[in-house]
């Protein structure tokens, strides 16, 4: 499936049925009935594209056809929106179809879109509706245990919506694309449906970072012909070598790496596009596992292998049961190729993940234990956590870590396999085995060698936990800066342990932690326990110490609060210094306000780089010796400034009617007789002066730079809008470059 696929390629009823040649007469009748039911129900409804809404329903069903799902799933996909958007009821679906199909449709209906707020608060971070996000994720994972097809339909629904996202408003594009990248693409990955995962990532990336997307896409497109010729030559060489050794039914394909994965690797390794070697990727599909390993040997005979780039996912499958051999080789011209080798069955599972498992499960009398265990593990992860209500945001983060991120596989001394999130430590391992083992853990051996308790485990290692007879965890384990614990389960169990201790013990332990942290930071002589408690909004010191002793507040949090407080004191000292040195502001001026108070007597100036005017969103920057510089919040110098502690909140106060502000603008237009007269007339009508003017001409295009003395932002917007309507003007905008 290509990211450029649209509903224009959607199958009609005949196409749906033809794509499923193994359907029984009953199955054909079921799909036909669902098709007509949905078509009639959605009659008269249209999408943002102007197409009939029913085209979306058929497109979703077509995606499930590609996954080769059963007739029930396809029928439910055709009707997946009828309960939400039409007068059709669940009872009606039960009567006309079956309870199972009605439940599938109802399940998809209940999985509403997850609301993610993209607006930024004063900290520069997006606020999250964490409780709704948590509930949504719980619904998805718990639904899978009942019938995984509900989630597969939801993924197909999201995929088609992403393919047609260009018809939505820009703010909705951003919200939906971010949501898809954070939730749905990782979900598809966890379920092993790589085709959908890749496409969701690329489509999301197209809207969340369009410039980077276009740059990589253009690079790929520019080199397509050379890449095709190069890969074709190497494929033929490999095919000939395989034929010599009796592997005659191999399928060899090649493709460029997906755009988002190229971008992530460029970011992760800080490499330019030219140095991303696995842009050239080849896949070899053979009949048997022995042929996989024989092919690997022949590949390494043809071209020199990069040993650090070899992974055997056949012997050690990924947590979503993905299997393949991955290698990277260097040819005789020094170019690198990534090669994947797998069987046809592995390929089927790689492309469609749990969908393939579902087909096997439904098509056989027996149970698919791998499939069942995988779903059960995901459900267990979601059901775990009695402290969800205490910190839903942290729980959501942990679920994403535990469920969506990479996992490792380690062994107990008895040889049992333990599945843990990447980054897990011996303490995480101990708590995974049993809470009591975690609490009594005091050391660990990895492959027979003693390691520190913050050692990050790796796949294939054997772990032995050293315990004491009695005892409990250390509060230091909760300090994220020390790296002792990296899984939610272990953190929750440790906090639970300390909550059970009596209040007196909590207070004593808390005092020890706070005292130690203040000494370490060198502030114990000027900061009391009361001062620290107030930083955390505690009125009573003992209540604060009890929270520290219970593990609700850790040493790292204390250090960060104290450090922030020290920086704030330094900043206020700088402000006071500015006040003392003030000499340039008329007494009684209230043009700019600081924290609700006027800045009369303070030295400040309007930044020349962005020239803010009344109505602009502004921020103050405390300079050294030159007072406070007033910038627009979106000024490039502010956005790229790393000294965030010197920024202060300011706002416009009472601006005098006669006040004027110099603002540079740029006008681009096809040159013609009378152009300047029309532009200056608009400006004169607003009673605005032109303080500077320059014109550049290139061929028939005139670029006009002006500096206008205006009253406020509203007046500026009005002028630019009117100039933009003038005949032959193609652009009129505010600019930061002084005229």
Image (cartoon, rainbow, N blue to C red):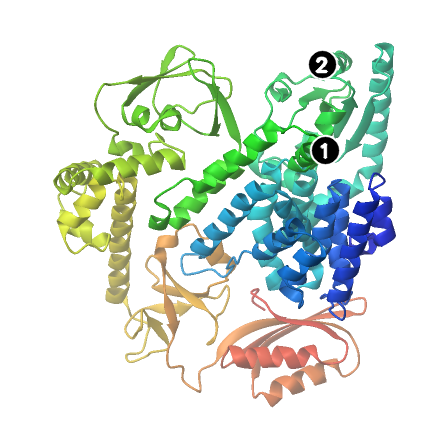
Q: Quadrant of the C terminus?
A: bottom right
Q: Which residue is mark 1?
A: 363
Dot 1, crowdedness within 10 Å: few (<14), some or many (≥20)?
few
Give how far across and how far down residue 650 sits, in percent.
Answer: 37, 68
Residue 327 in view of the camera: yes
Quadrant in which residue 658 is drawn: bottom left
Relative to 40, does residue 684 appear above or below in the rendering?
Answer: below
Along the line of sight, which residue is nearer the eye, 220 or 431? 431
Give how far across and how far down residue 497 sits, in percent.
Answer: 26, 35
* Side of 537 where 679 appears, left or right: right
Along the line of sight, which residue is nearer the eye, 338 or 648? 338
Disc 1/disc 2 C-alpha distance (Å):
30 Å
Give how far across and how far down residue 25 sits, in percent.
Answer: 84, 45
Task: Count the marks.
Answer: 2
> Circle 1 sits in a helix, a strand or a loop, which is it?
helix
Dot 2, crowdedness within 10 Å: few (<14), some or many (≥20)?
some
Give how far across and how far down residue 530 sits, in percent.
Answer: 14, 51
Q: Quadrant of the N terminus?
A: top right
Kindly identify the residue that appears in the image at 63 percent across and 22 percent down: 313
Q: Which mark is residue 293?
A: 2
Q: Which of pointers 1 and 2 indicates the residue nearer the eye? A: 1
Kindly identify the residue that appears in the image at 41 percent across and 34 percent down: 487
* Marks 1 and 2 in Cβ contact (< 8 Å): no
Q: Which mark is residue 402?
A: none
Kindly identify the residue that appears in the image at 31 percent across and 78 percent down: 586
Kindly identify the residue that appears in the image at 66 percent across and 49 percent down: 153
> Circle 2 sits in a helix, a strand or a loop, which is it?
helix
Residue 1 in view of the camera: no
Relative to 717, does residue 7 appear above or below in the rendering?
Answer: above
Of label 1 and label 2, which has the lower sequence position? 2
């Amino acid at each position: 499936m290509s990211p450029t696929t649209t509903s224009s390629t959607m199958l009609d009823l005949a196409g749906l049925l033809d794509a499923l040649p193994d359907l029984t007469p009953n199955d054909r009748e079921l799909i036909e009935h669902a098709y007509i039911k949905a078509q009639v129900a959605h009659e008269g409804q249209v999408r943002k594209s102007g197409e009939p809404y029913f085209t979306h329903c058929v497109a979703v069903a077509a995606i499930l056809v590609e996954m080769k799902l059963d007739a029930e799933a396809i029928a439910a996909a055709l009707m997946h929106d009828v309960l939400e958007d039409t007068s059709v009821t669940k009872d009606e679906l039960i009567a006309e179809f079956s309870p199972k199909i009605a439940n599938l449709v109802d399940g998809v209906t209940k999985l509403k879109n997850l609301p993610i707020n993209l607006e930024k608060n004063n900290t520069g971070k997006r606020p999250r509706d964490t409780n709704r996000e948590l509930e949504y994720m719980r619904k998805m994972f718990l639904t899978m245990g009942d019938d995984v097809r509900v989630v597969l339909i939801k993924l197909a629904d999201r995929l088609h919506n992403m393919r047609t996202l260009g018809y939505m408003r820009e703010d909705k594009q951003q919200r939906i694309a971010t949501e898809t990248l954070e939730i749905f693409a990782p979900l598809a990955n966890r379920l092993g449906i790589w085709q959908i995962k890749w496409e969701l990532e690329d489509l999301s990336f197209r809207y969340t970072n369009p410039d980077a997307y276009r740059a990589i896409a253009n690079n790929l497109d520019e080199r397509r012909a050379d890449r095709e010729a190069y890969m074709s030559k190497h494929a033929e060489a490999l095919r000939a070598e395989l034929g010599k050794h009796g592997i005659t039914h191999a399928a060899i394909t090649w493709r460029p790496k997906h755009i988002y994965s190229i971008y992530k690797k460029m970011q992760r390794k800080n490499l330019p596009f030219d140095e991303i070697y696995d842009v050239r990727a080849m896949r070899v599909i053979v009949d048997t596992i022995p042929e996989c390993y024989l092919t690997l040997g022949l590949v390494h005979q043809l071209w020199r292998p990069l040993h650090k780039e070899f992974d055997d996912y056949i012997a050690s499958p990924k947590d979503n049961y993905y299997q393949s051999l991955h290698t990277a080789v260097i040819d005789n011209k020094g170019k690198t190729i990534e090669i994947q080798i797998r069987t046809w069955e592995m390929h089927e599972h790689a492309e469609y993940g749990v969908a393939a498992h579902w087909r096997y499960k439904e098509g056989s009398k027996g149970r698919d234990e791998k499939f069942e265990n995988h779903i059960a593990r995901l459900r267990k992860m979601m059901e775990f956590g009695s402290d969800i209500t205490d910190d839903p945001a942290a729980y959501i983060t942990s679920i994403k870590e535990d469920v969506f991120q990479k996992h490792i596989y380690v062994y107990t001394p008895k040889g049992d396999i333990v599945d843990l999130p990447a980054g897990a430590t011996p303490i995480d391992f101990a708590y995974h085995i049993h809470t009591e083992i975690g609490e009594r853990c005091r050391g660990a051996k990895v492959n027979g060698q003693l390691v520190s308790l913050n050692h990050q485990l790796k796949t294939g290692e054997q772990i032995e936990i050293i315990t004491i007879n009695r005892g409990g965890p250390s509060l230091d384990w909760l300090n994220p800066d020390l790296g002792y614990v990296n899984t939610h389960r272990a953190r929750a169990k440790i906090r639970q342990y300390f909550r059970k201790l009596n209040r007196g013990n909590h207070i004593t332990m808390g005092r020890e932690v706070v005292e130690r942290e203040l000494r370490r930071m060198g502030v114990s002589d000027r900061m009391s326990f009361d001062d620290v408690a107030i930083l955390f909004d505690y009125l009573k010191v003992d209540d604060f110490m009890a929270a520290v002793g219970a593990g609700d507040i850790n040493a790292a949090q204390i250090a960060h609060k104290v450090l922030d407080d020290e920086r704030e004191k330094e900043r206020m000292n700088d402000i006071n210094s500015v006040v003392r040195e003030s000499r340039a502001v008329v007494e009684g001026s209230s043009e700019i306000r600081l924290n609700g108070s006027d800045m009369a007597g303070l030295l400040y100036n309007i930044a020349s780089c962005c020239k803010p005017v009344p109505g602009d969103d502004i921020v103050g920057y405390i300079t050294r010796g030159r007072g406070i510089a007033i910038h627009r919040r979106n000024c490039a110098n502010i956005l790229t400034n790393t000294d965030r502690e010197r920024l202060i909140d300011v706002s416009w106060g009472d601006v005098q009617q006669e006040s004027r502000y110099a603002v540079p603008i740029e006008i681009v237009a096809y040159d013609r007789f009378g152009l300047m007269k029309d532009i200056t007339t608009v400006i004169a009508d607003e009673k605005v002066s032109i303080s500077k003017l320059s014109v550049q001409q290139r061929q028939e295009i005139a670029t006009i730079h002006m500096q206008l003395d205006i009253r406020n932002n509203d007046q500026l917007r009005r002028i630019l809008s009117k100039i933009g309507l003038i005949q032959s003007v193609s652009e009129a905008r505010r600019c930061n470059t002084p005229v």
